[in-house]
Image: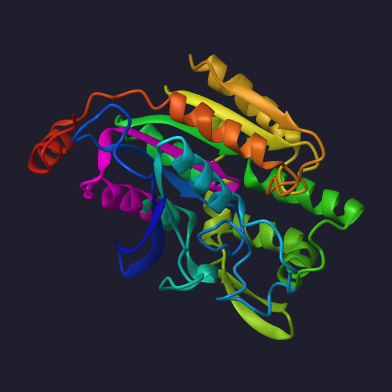
Amino acid sequence: MAHEELTVRAGNATLAGTLTLPDGPPPGQRRGRHPNVLLLPSWLPRDRDGGWDRAGHPAWFVAEPAARPGLLRRLADALAAVGVASLRCDPRGCGASDGAWESTSLFTRIDDARDMLAAMRSHGALDLRRTGLVGHGEGATLALSVAIGDPAVSALTLVGAAARSQRDVVRRGVAERSRTGADREHPVVAALDRWAEDLVERAERREASVRIRIAGAWVELQLAALEQAIHTPNLALATMLHRSVAMVHGADDAWAAPDESDLLLAALREAGNDPALRTVPGAGHDLAEAEDDLIAELAADLAGRLEPRELPPVLVALEEMGGGVQ
């Protein structure tokens, strides 16, 4: 496989990303393009690989010994092994990307995901008719929001997705982490959990921001992202989606309880979809405990669901400008 470093212009920010390409041309196609997937990370500052953003926010997370790569990097490598390209980017204010994570709204992150998808579609090695989305945690909300308005998206895989309002997800997550201690070693997690009820109440009152103390420093946290997430539950988004969807949830997820995916599964079925759900015993939110064979199975499943889609006129024109798909 090959890794191509690229930048994506997203509104007023530049996002740094990695495009992972399979070796050689697509199987059986002399001049074809690769099916492709956009990988979207979970809550809190993350890097493009799906791990905690220790580059942009070193004081917010404790150091970690050598471990498996982040979930999105593992999926990118597994997708390349089955002939699927993928793009993953550092979110705003994380890694090598512009901006500030703590002042980025949910709707801005959705727009950024659309811009990443547009960047993929301008790449000559990628097939505009076979594009998928992987959304992890908050990334599931981004993936659903993008797919609803984009008929060219073939399939989605949602990992550790919430279903209810973020108000309920936050409260349940705090209770679970209080019970288990999961991720509480990180200063940002401990601080946000301590302030969680206040943050929810202020967001519901539509206050603009709040100052909270993280790792000994005061941080101005904009509340638009939380307020928007409270009023944009995935249960509502699921009613507007008509696409191939697979869901995966760690049985020990301390950020979105496993029954969130049960609720989302029912909502997707009610909307006329035929979703599948896989629960991974012993795995947390990041599926770090999952063996490589399981990650490979998830990649192969998504690859098999990337059926060609009819393109809207603007993408047909873009396809023709790029020489077409064989």
Q: Is residue 6 left or right of residue 62?
A: left
**325 or 274, nearer to the observer:** 325
Q: Nearer the viewer, residue 140 or 23?
A: 23
Counting from the top left corner in percent of width and height, residue 42 is at 59, 52
For the image, the number of numbered tags is 0
- Left or right, 323 with reference to 16: left
Q: Is residue 234 visible?
A: no
User: Residue drawn at (69%, 26%), measured in percent from left and top?
Assistant: 262
Q: 107 above or below 13? A: above
Inspect the magenta stretch and tell me whether residue 282 lies in it: no
Q: Is residue 315 left or right of residue 277?
A: left
Could you tell me which residue is drawn at 44 percent across and 43 percent down?
A: 80
Work out which residue is located at the far right of the displayed protein and give it. Answer: 179
Residue 234 in the image: state x and y as whole percent: 56, 36
Is 128 included in the stretch rendered in magenta?
yes
Q: Position of residue 109 (x, y in %)?
A: 44, 56
> Residue at left 43%, top 73%?
99
- The magenta region covers 112-140
Instruction: Pick out the residue farthest to the bottom.
Output: 217
**26 to 166, vertically: above or below:** above
